[in-house]
Image (cartoon, rainbow, N blue to C red):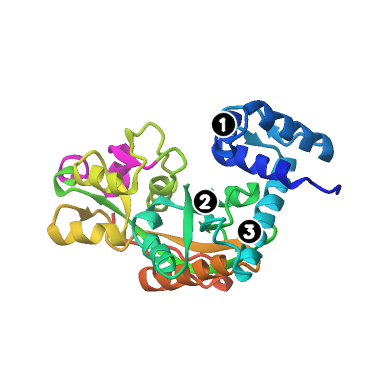
């Protein structure tokens, strides 16, 4: 590969992080024309199209390779400067991390706070479904991710964190109005349901386990793309939904929510994937995340035994 000018690589990183040429120009204190010229020069040097000029921009496969290279190089450069005592002028390190919403709302932030109390680190968090966070790793947009995938992204290591357990919840009044008079497996698919977003398949996954031959198509759905608001939407009676034990426990104690199928649940194993990079800040975050997960999550499943299934329950 030909030598890549660092100013051009840094410009590509800025465009990807900011989303547009204009925003990148503002962040770099140059003109949009200068940004465009640097990207064109980098594409000519690599002989590849690196960006699709959409809003926001989208990386090509070749662009993902260059972005990963650039971000790793920037991290190594900062870490070396820190060890030499030259990092004061550059400011604190910023770590881009992908994390799912339910982890963000429950156990994840205390881990970052623990690291930030000891190190001068800032965080650029990217929220996405746990089934999709590895996409951001592949693109080079983040250096680490909480993910449901145990298969390592190229150039990454994997560490099991534990399991988030989700149960089907609704208010007692909702259950009395929509789910009484017939077995749950016959009624639940037709009842109003709360879904996080269009990537969220936890409710459908629960239904498939409850009644494998029934289709969820045609159900009344409310989309609530916030972990805290999702719980409140279910507690307000908008529909039933799958809620992690950590968030449902207070409502169960207060009687504002009820477990619709005691003994049935969906377990989502979580893993920490990060670049194989000798970076002290990244290592410190990984250690804190693993410790916080051990305190808050159920033990990770034994991968040698295959996935754990929810036990059967009447209904």
Q: Pointers 1 and 3 in contact (CB under 8 A)?
A: no
- Of the residues under marks 1 and 3, which one precedes in the sequence? 1
The stretch in magenta equals 176-196
Q: Helix or strand or loop: what does disc 2 sit on?
A: loop
Q: How packed is label 1: few (under 14 Cα within 10 Å), some, or many (20 or more)?
A: some
Which residue is labeled 2 in the image? 131
Which-is-in-front pick, marks 2 and 3?
3
Location of residue 36 in the rendering, given as x and y in whole percent from the top left corner = 69, 29
Residue 280 sits in which quadrant? bottom right
Q: How packed is label 2: few (under 14 Cα within 10 Å), some, or many (20 or more)?
A: some
Closer-to-camera residue (187/285):
285
Q: Left or right of 200: which side holds 231?
A: left
Q: Is residue 14 above or below residue 266?
A: above
In which quadrant of the rendered image does the C terminus lie?
A: bottom left
Residue located at (67% from left, 40% from top): 12
| Residue 148 is at least partly visible in this image | no
Residue located at (39% from left, 55% from top): 104
């Amino acid at each position: 590969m030909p030598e890549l000018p660092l100013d051009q690589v840094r410009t590509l990183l800025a465009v990807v992080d900011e989303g547009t040429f204009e925003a990148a120009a503002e962040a770099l204190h140059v003109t949009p024309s200068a940004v465009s010229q640097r990207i064109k020069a980098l594409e000519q040097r690599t002989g590849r199209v690196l960006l699709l000029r959409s809003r926001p921009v989208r990386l090509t496969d070749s662009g993902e390779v260059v972005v990963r290279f650039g971000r790793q190089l920037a991290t190594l450069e900062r870490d070396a400067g820190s060890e030499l005592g030259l990092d004061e002028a550059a400011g604190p390190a910023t770590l881009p991390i992908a994390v799912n919403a339910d982890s963000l709302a429950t156990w994840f932030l205390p881990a970052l706070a623990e690291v930030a109390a000891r190190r001068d680190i800032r965080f650029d968090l990217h929220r996405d479904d746990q089934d999709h966070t590895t996409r951001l790793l592949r693109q080079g947009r983040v250096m680490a991710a909480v993910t449901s995938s145990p298969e390592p992204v190229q150039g990454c290591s994997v560490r099991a964190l534990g399991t988030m357990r989700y149960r089907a919840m609704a208010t007692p009044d909702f259950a009395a109005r929509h789910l009484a008079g017939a077995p749950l497996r016959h009624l639940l698919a037709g009842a109003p349901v709360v879904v996080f977003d269009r990537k969220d398949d936890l409710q459908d996954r629960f239904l498939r386990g409850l009644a494998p031959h029934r289709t969820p198509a045609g159900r009344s759905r409310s989309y609530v793309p916030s972990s805290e608001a999702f719980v409140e939407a279910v507690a307000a009676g908008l529909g039933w939904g799958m809620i992690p034990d950590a968030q449902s426990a207070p409502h169960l104690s207060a009687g504002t929510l009820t477990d619709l199928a005691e003994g049935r649940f969906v377990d989502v194993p979580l893993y920490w994937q990060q670049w194989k990079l000798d970076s002290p800040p990244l290592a410190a975050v990984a250690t804190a995340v693993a410790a916080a997960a051990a305190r808050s999550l159920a033990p990770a499943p034994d991968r040698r035994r295959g996935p754990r299934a929810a036990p059967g329950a009447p209904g």
